[in-house]
Image (cartoon, grey):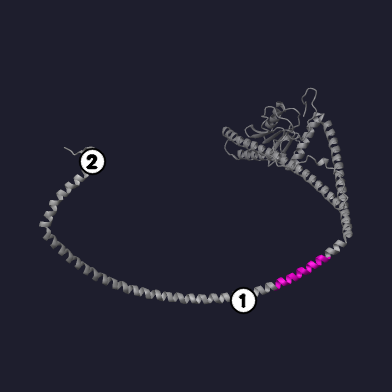
Amino acid sequence: MLPDNLRTCTISQFQNVLLFASKLLQIEESVSDEFTRDSLFAEYLKDINQKHSEQLLSVEKKSIVEFSSKISSFMTKNSEIEEEHKAAIAELKREYDQQLKNLQKVKATLEADLVTTKSELQATHIKESKTLSKRVSELEAELQIASKSESSIRERCQLESERVLKVVEEKNREMLKLKEDAISQREQKVMLKEQELQSKLQRQSSSVLRGHDGEGLFKGLAKEKMNWDLVKAPTFSCDYSSTIHNTLTLFEVKNYTNPIPQVEVTKFLRDMKLHPEARTGIFISLNTTICGRDPNAPITLDWINASQCVMYIQACADLDLDHVFSLIDQVIRISGIFNNFINSQTTESNEPILQTRIDQAKTYLERSISRGAKLIKKIMTDRKHQIDFIESSTIYNISELKYQHADITTSIQTLLGEYSETPVDTEELEGIEKPVAKKPRSRAKPTSLLSPGLVGSNGKDTKE
């Protein structure tokens, strides 16, 4: 039966009781083991302890001997290293002493130079101080003289202002004279232009005279730009013929106000067929399109009669003439080369093969002509834009110069006490802005080189 205190104790107290009981059991078991060890193995443990002590003594003696031998070699090396270190330290000390002596010598030299420089600077400072004091006294004297001669300064300012005003007035008179001369020259040019337009209008009233004018204009341009001599041959029904690059070329020039009818083209092609010795034909419409031709392609090519090349030019006056004449020259040259190749063949000509070659070459020629026309249009647009920009820049610069002239005149009058609140006449300069470069816009259709003639009552031309 358990005691009362165990039944009433807490769980932790009961756990401690169990722990003490387990320890008592362990002590009870070890009591028998210790008695056996102390009684049976005491002698054996004594022998083992004695042997162990003897082995420890022998190991200790051996380690002492080995350590003493090693420490002796180490001491020897240590003494050698100490001697080497002493020698190196002595050498470094000698070098240090030598460098110290050199530094002391340099220091002495620098101190001497410093003393010399200080003395020179002091002398220079004293000299400059004397010069400046002398200059100050001179300026004070000049200032006193200038303060006494204020009236003379005003007179000189008055004279200078009068001189400047005279120069400005003279320049204004020159500008007015130049402007009047330019206006008179412009009026003369306008009168001449009016007379020319009146005479041209009178000639345009007749379709025959208008056609002759167009032919003469083209002939003059061909002579001026390409040095071609266009002649009227009685054997041809076309307007002109000429031998260019050893190739006979026929020219038909039309100066219509309406599209060229197909009958005129047919007549020219018939003339080409009747004269196979003419290798190239140029059909030109100065102001209008040609019936049966694409109006968006101003220059086109056709090969007829197996080896003859015909070039159609629509609205020639709207194109760049240098580019047009260059294309005509290139086409004539290519046609001559092709016909010379045909004539050099000894065998019979194979027309299908030649026609295939012509069609292939025609594609590349038309592509080249189209690209050239686009390039020329872009160049003309850029040139017009640049001209407009230069004109606007010139107007802006002239206005700025006039403003500067007005400001200078006002400043002189203010200095002389003659300024009045009269407004400067700059109304014409208002609204002028500084020109800014802009992207070129699409070029408007240029004025035709030939003024369109009068149209008959039926609205068509009866003759070129």
**Residue 343 location in percent, x, y?**
62, 39
Q: Is residue 401 magenta?
A: no
Segment colored magenta: 123-141
Q: Is residue 129 magenta?
A: yes
Q: State the SS at label 1.
A: helix
- Residue type, numbered disc 1: Ala
Left or right relative to 119: residue 76: left
Q: What residue is shown at x 89% (from left), y 57% (from top)?
A: 155
Q: State the SS at label 2.
A: helix
**Residue 217 location in percent, x, y?**
77, 37
Of 197 and 341, nearer the camera is 197
Label 1 and label 2: CA atoms lie apart by: 103 Å
Q: Residue 28: which disc?
A: none
Q: Is residue 7 above or below residue 402?
A: above
Q: Which residue is mark 2?
A: 14
Of 276 and 72, nearer the camera is 72
Q: Is residue 134 above or below residue 171?
A: below
